[in-house]
Image (cartoon, rainbow, N blue to C red):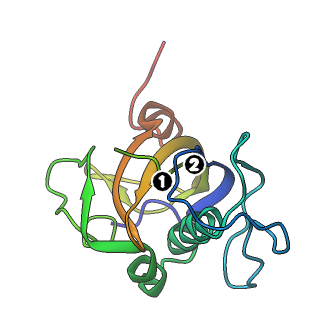
Amino acid sequence: MKLLTAMAALVAVTLPLMACSARATTTDRPLVDSAVDLVAPGTVNVGDAPVTDRTREVVRIAQTLYTFWNTSDTEYLHRAVDPGFVDNTLPPGRPQGPAGPVAASDTFTARLIFRGHFTGTYDGRIGTGQPIEFGAIDIQHVGDARIDSDWHLEDNLTFLRQAGLVAVG
């Protein structure tokens, strides 16, 4: 089902990593991976936590996941998400694990803005290309090397209103 022609634009990533596994604190390398194929967050906030190799790893994994959402290239999904991934806010009918999206000290929170046009079909209604822009919040936990669980909340009411699927007011 094609709902949006363009997916996520990563706006911010917040990394409450104060209890991250102890790894060397280093300041000689940037926190955000500047690889041209990865999306770059607008801001990264680690609070008073030291920047460690683990902090950089969590940021890179977050960038990799949101590059998947931005490009739909499943190679990024497989690099970011553990095979035992658990979606804690799974919608009915979506499978668990990496197939779903196609105590947490190592977590990150991302605020996303989805922008595009409703050109597909939703609940029997056909889009006419109307512009869509709505927000979402994702909280992801990074296990040993990849994301192993998440919690997410999308502003579905805004999406449904903009798509002309519900009237409010």
- Residue 6 visible to the viewer: no
Residue 106: mark:
1
Q: CA distance from mark 2 to mark 1?
A: 6 Å
User: In the image as oriented, which residue stretches furthest toward the top?
Assistant: 169
Residue 57: mark:
none
Q: Quadrant of residue 61?
A: bottom right
Residue sitting nearer the eye, 85 or 47? 47
Residue 166, image x, y percentages: 39, 30
Marks 2 and 1 close (CB-CB < 8 Å): yes
Amino acid, disc 2 = Leu
Of mark 2 and mark 1, the one earlier in the sequence is 2
Residue drawn at x 52%, y 42% as measured from the top left: 136
87 lies above or below 96: above
Residue drawn at x 48%, y 12% as measured from the top left: 169
Residue sitting nearer the eye, 58 or 62? 58
92 lies above or below 79: above
Residue drawn at x 72%, y 58% as measured from the top left: 51
Where's the N terminus, which quadrant?
bottom left
Q: Secondary structure at mark 1?
A: loop
- Residue 119 visible to the viewer: yes
Neighbour tally class for label 2: few under 14, some 14-19, many 20 plus, Cα within 10 Å: many
Residue 96 left/right relative to 117: left
Q: Quadrant of residue 141?
A: bottom left
Residue 118, image x, y percentages: 50, 56
Q: Return the residue at label 2.
A: 17
